[in-house]
Structure formats: structure tokens, C-alpha cells
């Protein structure tokens, strides 16, 4: 039985090891194997996979398929073989297309999971190993650095300027600074547990060492995934509309059949003839081409989406997305990209946009801008790699990344400042409210570059820029 998180955030790190029979050198290989058998792989279990027969039966039990099958049987009763086989063919084609599309989407998702299988740095018997994250167990010691994804719920043991993005769990885009000290308060919510790292969080900056507490379905993300899997599947707008139409058509068909029978009796037709005429009318009411048309249309839409690298598991999802008019959210980082961008520069009492900055550069007023962008690049722990005009990698705090990207956009690329060496630096922290770098140029001259909260920076300055 895995312990509750409250037990771990309220105790010192040295007290956490005995609870999981671990140590600061990590688990032994034998203990890790035993824990893997006990707790299972560190992955969120999927719902029970449906067999081909189950999928086939589900498709055949769709309301439209049942109605069309009934129409086919009626057609055979009146010996309209062509109509009967045509309707059966429509049901068959519709079912096959749906099964093929679902299987293609499932295979694509499985292949993506294999390609994106994460790895983690783990201490085992005091030795550093790199293993697949699915083999991590409670009691393991993991090492984390900027750019890593936290593989399980952990208690932070050591941390140096550790900034973490927990927006996937809390919805808050602001980076959270994690510290290893014990927290004595009780009943804390997830975002208040400053010494706990949660599975799926991204390390934005700093380094850390953590003790794994919970894995797989026992993590906070695992609990969310489990509740989602247990929720009932809702019908799409298209399925609801089709259900209404089918009920109407079935009612219309039976009403028409009964009406035809009454008229036939009044006209003194033979009972067999009246029945055949009524069934013919009922078959004619059903739009047997509708399911095939819908399936083919949705399949074409799925193919178009696939060409744009979007995998759709269910055909009906395309139609559901087509009915979305607005997406309303107040949680940056949950639905949005969680990318920050520099929109304006405050210089000499004025707010300037990118075009005005480019105009300043063209007019030869680039000395001030060089200092701004030099500070953005050198006084930062973030990393942005640009190649052929494209950003191919970005790691670190979103604010610092946006500042470096703005420098690149304005033509001040990081490699232009290679001759300036960082001698020492102070990373940003919520206590200091600034970060600073001591930089030496090729002539040996040293300068301090600093950025942070305006009021804090101004209190450290003797001079500030006013109109040159």
C-alpha cells in the first residue's frame, strides 16, 4: 500500500527513505525487481481493449444498422432481391470502413507511444543508470534537470533553483519553485505542496534529486485518467440527431404500412398483396444510402486531418469538432500552447512594438538595444537553439525563453555574444526577484548584467536611461 502524499511533504528527506526501504544511494536491483512485481510498471493502465468481435457487434448494433437490416429482411420477404442485397451491402461497407479507421488510429497511437517512450536517470546501488520510465518503482532516486518530464510523483530531496511547470495538473501557467524543506501545515492542496513533484510536470530550470513515492495509476495523473476512463461515453451531436431521425422514420414507416393495409382492405385487395405493398412502402421510407454517405464523408475528413499530423480515433469525433463554435477557458497552459511572447518594449517612457525597434536599429540606435538583448541572452539559464531561421529547441523558464526569442527575432543571435564569457551568475529566485551575470569581454573588462522585477532593479541602480 503506497503512502499518502501528506506523510512525505511533512517530514524531512532523511525520514522519507525508511518508509520506502530506500536510501540516498537508491534501491538495489533486487529490491527494484521486487517492487516492479508488487506495484507494476510505471504507466497508466488503459481500459480493457475491445476484441474485433466486440467492435463488430457494436457497429452492427448501431440504430441505423439495425433499421437497415430490418429493411433488408422486409425486402427479401417481398422477393426484391436486388434491394435486399443492396441494403445489406451498405451495412457491410459502413461497418468495414468504421472498423478499418478505428484500427488504423489505434495502431498509429500505439506506434507514437513506442517512439515517445520516455527515459529517466535513476540511482540504483549508488550507480547512475538511464532506464525507461515505465520501470521506475517507489523508492527509486531520480535525477532531474531542465527539459525533463517528471516520470512519477516524487518527494524532492535536493533542488537547485528548481522551476517546474504543473499547468497540466493545476491549470496554472506560472512556474512553481520547488524546495526540499519539510512543510508542517496539514491538509495542503496539490499546488501548495512545494516539495512534491508530480508525474507529467516539466522541469523548466535548475536541477534536482527526488525520491519516487507513487507510480502509474497511483499518481495524481493516474487518478485523473482512471476517473476519465470510468466516465460514461456521451453520444456525439450527429449520433443524437441520427437517433431522432431514425425514431421518426421508423414511426413513419409503420404508420405508412398500417395506412396502406387499411386502404388495401377498403379496396378489397388480397391480404398477401396488401402485406407486400405495405412492406414495399416501409422499405422505401428508409434512406439506406445515408450511413454509407456519412461514413465516407467522415473518413475523407479523417484522412485530411491525418495529413496535418492529427490522429483521430473515432470517426464521430470529426463531426463533434465541426460543431464547436467557441472554446472558453481561463487556464493558460491547459488548452493554449503556454508560449510567452514579447509584444512591447518600454524605453524612455514609451511602449514600442517590434517594428519600432527595427526602425531604431535601422537608424543606428542599437547600442541600448544591444545591452537589452545581451542581458536577455547572457543573464538567463534558458536555452534556445535556432537553425536556418527556425527554433528547433527551447528549454527553461517561459519568460526567459521569450526574451531570448525576441533577441533572435530582432537580429541579436546568441552566437554573436560568444566572445563575452560568463564568469559567475546568480539564477532568478522568488526571494531575490532578479538574476545577474558577471561577464568578461575579450579585453578582460568585466561588467554585471542584471534583470528582474523593475522596483528591485531600480533600487540597485545609480543611473537609468533617459532619452540617450
Image (tube, grey):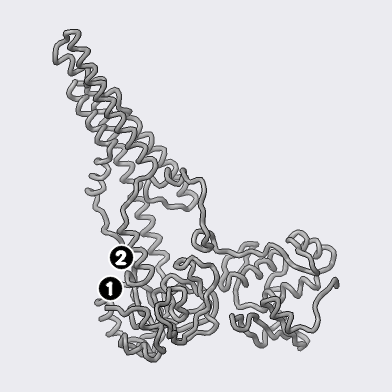
- To which quarter of the image does residue 33 belong? bottom left
Residue 442, x across and y down, in percent: 75, 84
Q: Are marks 1 and 2 in contact (CB under 8 Å)?
A: yes
* Residue under the point 29% across and 59% down: 47
Query: For the point 63% across and 77% down, which residue is it?
Result: 380
Q: Which residue is mark 1?
A: 40
**What is the x, y in percent for residue 441?**
75, 84
The residue most toward the left is 271
- Where, by quadrant of the figure, is residue 293 drawn? top left
In the image, residue 55 above or below residue 69:
below
Mark 1, Cα crowd under 10 Å, few <14 / some 14-19 / many 20+, is: some
The C terminus sits in image quarter: bottom right
Q: Is residue 49 left or right of residue 192?
A: left
Estimate how packed mark 2 is, as few (under 14), some (14 to 19) or many (20 or more) residues with alpha carbons within 10 Å. some
Numbered label attached to residue 251:
none
Of residues 106 and 171, which is closer to you in this image? 171
* Side of 48 where 456 appears, left or right: right
Residue 45, labelled with which disc?
Answer: 2
Amino acid at each position: 500500500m503506497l503512502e499518502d502524499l501528506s506523510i512525505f511533504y511533512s517530514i524531512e528527506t532523511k525520514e522519507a527513505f525508511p518508509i520506502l526501504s530506500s536510501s540516498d544511494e537508491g534501491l538495489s536491483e533486487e529490491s527494484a525487481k521486487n517492487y516492479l512485481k508488487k506495484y507494476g510498471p510505471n504507466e497508466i493502465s488503459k481500459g480493457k481493449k475491445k476484441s474485433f468481435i466486440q467492435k463488430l457487434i457494436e457497429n452492427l448494433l448501431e440504430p441505423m444498422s439495425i433499421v437497415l437490416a430490418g429493411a433488408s429482411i422486409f425486402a427479401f420477404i417481398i422477393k426484391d432481391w436486388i434491394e435486399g442485397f443492396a441494403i445489406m451491402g451498405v451495412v457491410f461497407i459502413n461497418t468495414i470502413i468504421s472498423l478499418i479507421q478505428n484500427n488504423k488510429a489505434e495502431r498509429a497511437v500505439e506506434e507514437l507511444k513506442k517512439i515517445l517512450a520516455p527515459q529517466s536517470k535513476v540511482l540504483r546501488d549508488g550507480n547512475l543508470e538511464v532506464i525507461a520510465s515505465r520501470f521506475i518503482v517507489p523508492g527509486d532516486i531520480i535525477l532531474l534537470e531542465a527539459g525533463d518530464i517528471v516520470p512519477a510523483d516524487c518527494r524532492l530531496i535536493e533542488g537547485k533553483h528548481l522551476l517546474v511547470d504543473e499547468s497540466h495538473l493545476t491549470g496554472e501557467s506560472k512556474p512553481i519553485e520547488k524546495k526540499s524543506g519539510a512543510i508542517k501545515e496539514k491538509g495542503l492542496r496539490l499546488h501548495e505542496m512545494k516539495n512534491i513533484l508530480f508525474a507529467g510536470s516539466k522541469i523548466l530550470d535548475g536541477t534536482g534529486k527526488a525520491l519516487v513515492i507513487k507510480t502509474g495509476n497511483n499518481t495524481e495523473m493516474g487518478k485523473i485518467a482512471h476517473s476519465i476512463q470510468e466516465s460514461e461515453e456521451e453520444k456525439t451531436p450527429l449520433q443524437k440527431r441520427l437517433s431522432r431521425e431514425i425514431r421518426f422514420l421508423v414511426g413513419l414507416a409503420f404508420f405508412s404500412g398500417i395506412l396502406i393495409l387499411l386502404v388495401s382492405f377498403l379496396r378489397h385487395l388480397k391480404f398477401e398483396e396488401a402485406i407486400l405493398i405495405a412492406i414495399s412502402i416501409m422499405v422505401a421510407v428508409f434512406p439506406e444510402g445515408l450511413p454509407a454517405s456519412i461514413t465516407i464523408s467522415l473518413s475523407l475528413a479523417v484522412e485530411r486531418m491525418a495529413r496535418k499530423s492529427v490522429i483521430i480515433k473515432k470517426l464521430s469525433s470529426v463531426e463533434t469538432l465541426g460543431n464547436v463554435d467557441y472554446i472558453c477557458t481561463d487556464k493558460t497552459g491547459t488548452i493554449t500552447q503556454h508560449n510567452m511572447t514579447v509584444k512591447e518594449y518600454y524605453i524612455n517612457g514609451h511602449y514600442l512594438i517590434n517594428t519600432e525597434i527595427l526602425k531604431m536599429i535601422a537608424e543606428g540606435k542599437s547600442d541600448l538595444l544591444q545591452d537589452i538583448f545581451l542581458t536577455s541572452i547572457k543573464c538567463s539559464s534558458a536555452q534556445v537553439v535556432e537553425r536556418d531561421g527556425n527554433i528547433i529547441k527551447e528549454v527553461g523558464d517561459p519568460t526567459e525563453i521569450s526574451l531570448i526569442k525576441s533577441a533572435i527575432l530582432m537580429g541579436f543571435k546568441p552566437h554573436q555574444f560568444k566572445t563575452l564569457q560568463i564568469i559567475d551568475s546568480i539564477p532568478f529566485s522568488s526571494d531575490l526577484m532578479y538574476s545577474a551575470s558577471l561577464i568578461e569581454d575579450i579585453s578582460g573588462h568585466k561588467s554585471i548584467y542584471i534583470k528582474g522585477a523593475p522596483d528591485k532593479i531600480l533600487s540597485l541602480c545609480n543611473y537609468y536611461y533617459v532619452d540617450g
